[in-house]
Amino acid sequence: MAIGSKVVGASVVAGQYGIINPEQTLGELSQEVRIVDPAATLGTIEQNVRGIDKAKTLVSFTQRVLGDGELPSDIYVPAGYVELNGLMLTCETPYNNISIDHSEGQNSTASMNVTYPTGAEINIPTFHGKPVKVLVHSDQTDITSPLIPLFVGWVETAKHNMKDQSISFTCSDLRAERLSREYQSGDVPDWAKYSKYVGGEIEKKNLWTAYLEAYSGNLGYAKDGELNRWDWDVISSPVDLTLTDDDVSPDELTTEFMTRSSVINEITIEGKYRWSKLWSVNTTVNAYNPRNPSGRAFDRSILLQKVESLGEWDLTDYTFYNLERSNCGFLPNSPTICIDFIWTAIGRTTYSQGIRADLVRRVAQPISEEYTINVNAPESIDAYGETVNGGTISFSIDNNYDGNFWETEIRERSNFDPETVFKPVYQARADRLREELPNAFDTAYGKARRKIVESHRQNYASCTVNRIVDIEVGDVVLHDNRILNVKGQCVGLGYNIADGLSTTEIKIAFCYLDTTETSSDYFIQPARPNYGPSTSNISSSAIYNRDSGVFDLTIADIPEYITDENTLERSSGATVKVNKTDVTLINGY
Amino acid sequence: MAFKLYTDAACTIPFTGTLSFVHNSDFSDNPQDSVLYYAEKELDPADNGSYEMQMPSGGNINITIEDSSVGIGHETTEIKLALTSAGLDTAVAGAPLSLGTSITSGVSNATPIHIRVTNAVSTAGISTELSLKKPETVVVATGAA
């Protein structure tokens, strides 16, 4: 890059690029004064969001009228009631073999067989797709005791069989369909963690599954049809049901331990976050050549024009080196009288010996932050003596920032000042998705925790109690009997009602580990890697070329550590507790 | 989360949905009273009165008595509703119960719903035709904390 002009001794030629121009009007200046109306708050918008509580039945009455002279104690207590589409199926419509199954993570189901009178027209609308409720007395010896529901759902299938003139119904609580409606608003519930960067863009009807993926627990509907949610941490929860020797038949009690190959005690989280660091790279051009002996001076306007036109560099400040008086040393025979025609008041403001110019250039540098978090279960690692990695949960957040705005387009702003152009708001725009990062980490940790806890929750104890037991899936059950002593969580509940038969099958899940190690759920957000400064200075040079009479300017290349994408890595750890419990198992009576 | 019925004033025992009565056919055990408590404690566990239930367009929240088989069996006139036990004596049989223009969340603000059933059916049998229903309402934040 060459800047400057030639000046030839006494026969002064001012400027390399032209003769000194006389004073003249260069143009008219148009000025418009505008009244500034400052920013102000015109008003406040108050918005009150209301939750909708739908119309519904609060109370269903069941009224039994006794016959003349009958006493409640005379009444045979039905093993159960089936209410179909609001009507109680009484003994005039016998039914038998009511089976109900509640299993964690599944639709609850019920099945029954209803015998209709011979010749009667079956009223199909009374059952097709209609609501079903199965109820029993809380005290199955007392007709006056309250009715408790064992199942609330809808008829799924109905199969008429002429052989026994009955209809076999299967019913479902439509768990998945109802949960889909329950959570399709898109409002993330307090107990859930969801990030679209971790779980993907989920259809609204499937949001509930995404919420569950990062939750160590489960969702379902209780026996009365109400929404139910429970954590998998049974250790710190009170016991809802204790099964003693009086409850459990040893012949129907089984205990099953998890398979070794299903153990997962470590999950890796890999998170990537990409943003742009907005650099301001500074340099100084220092071009100076003395007047003597060459006699050369340089037109200030041309010097300035040149430093203002250095491509992507913007001029922030400059200073001219003052014109020096010539001693005519460039003339032969060193004349005794030296007349310097540009050494005038005008000349001294028109010419100079060089310029010192401060320049700045903006660079938007992509930064890629790569986080690795190892989530593990110390109790399990100690028990099994091995770290069993169950896979990686990955996510990526990219701001996709267009660096062109910072590097060039910003010059088009009406108030552009290269010296003060940097504002925190610009950097914030290039990093605007950082606020999504904590939620992404929380969601990923939640998913890891669920996988690890779930894999350790596959020890089961199953028993049959010869009565109706009023508990829910998710309740905490303590086996405290001769055979088994363990605290677990109900994952399966089965009711069977038939002539002379009312039983409850209870399946619990628990975590057993042979270790005294303890752990906790521990996770903190990883610290942001150090990304260094965003300003830098690079060197430039300006050397006067005697042959060409101009300055040869060299600005160093922007170094790669500023222009190239920079990857910053950060590793950390987190732990999970698997809610282990002690187990005592006796073989025999 | 929504306002629910409980069987105790402390709102620890959720109501399962079915209120069962056994009646003598000679009406000798009439009437039979029961009470349930309508409260929202899950949204407002600290009992701060943080939420209110209101009708969407204003007006009273009315609990109505419904009969799925009008003219047959038990009728709505067997049921009386009141906000107090003494109120059952003067309540109109079959009439809706007004909870007022709003009810407030929290256990301490639970609304008691007193129910009196006077059987009028003399034929032995079992029926589930009567029920109590609430209309669609809205739940708004009061700003109390």
Image (cartoon, rainbow, N blue to C red):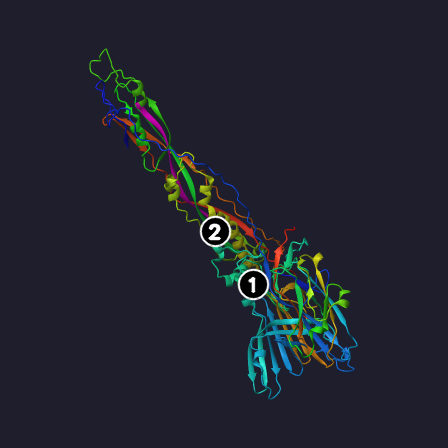
Q: Is residue A466 visible?
A: no
Question: Residue most toward the bottom?
Answer: A119
Report the disc number at residue A405.
Answer: none
Chain letter belonging to callout 1: A
Give the residue at mark 1.
A182
Q: Position of residue B141 (x, y in %)?
A: 62, 54
Chain letter belonging to callout 2: A
Eyeballing the image, is B93 above or below B103? below
Q: Position of residue A124 (x, y in %)?
A: 56, 80
Give the residue at mark 2.
A271
Q: Position of residue A335 (x, y in %)?
A: 22, 12
Q: Amino acid at mark 1?
A: Glu
- Corner quadrant of residue A145: bottom right
- Provide the residue span drawn in magenta: A350-369
Looking at the rendered image, the quarter that the N terminus of chain B falls into is bottom right
Eyeballing the image, is A505 above or below A115? above
Q: Is residue A366 magenta?
A: yes
Give A484 or B18, whichever is nearer the viewer.
Answer: B18
Q: What whole-number distance in Å separates the C-alpha atoms at marks 1 and 2?
A: 31 Å
Specify few, some or many for label 1: CA neighbours under 10 Å numbering under 14, 14-19, or 20 or more: some
Q: Is residue A397 magenta?
A: no
Give A260 or A269, whichever is nearer the viewer.
Answer: A269
Question: Residue most toward the top?
Answer: A336
Q: Earlier in the sequence, mark 1 or mark 2?
A: 1
Q: Position of residue A560 (x, y in %)?
A: 37, 40
- Corner quadrant of residue A507: bottom right
- Corner quadrant of residue A467: bottom right
Give the residue at x 60% y 70%. Answer: A102
Q: Please name the predominant secondary structure of the magenta segment in the image.
A: strand
Q: Amino acid at mark 2?
A: Gly
Q: Looking at the picture, do discs 1 and 2 lie on one chain?
A: yes
Helix, strand or loop under label 2 = strand
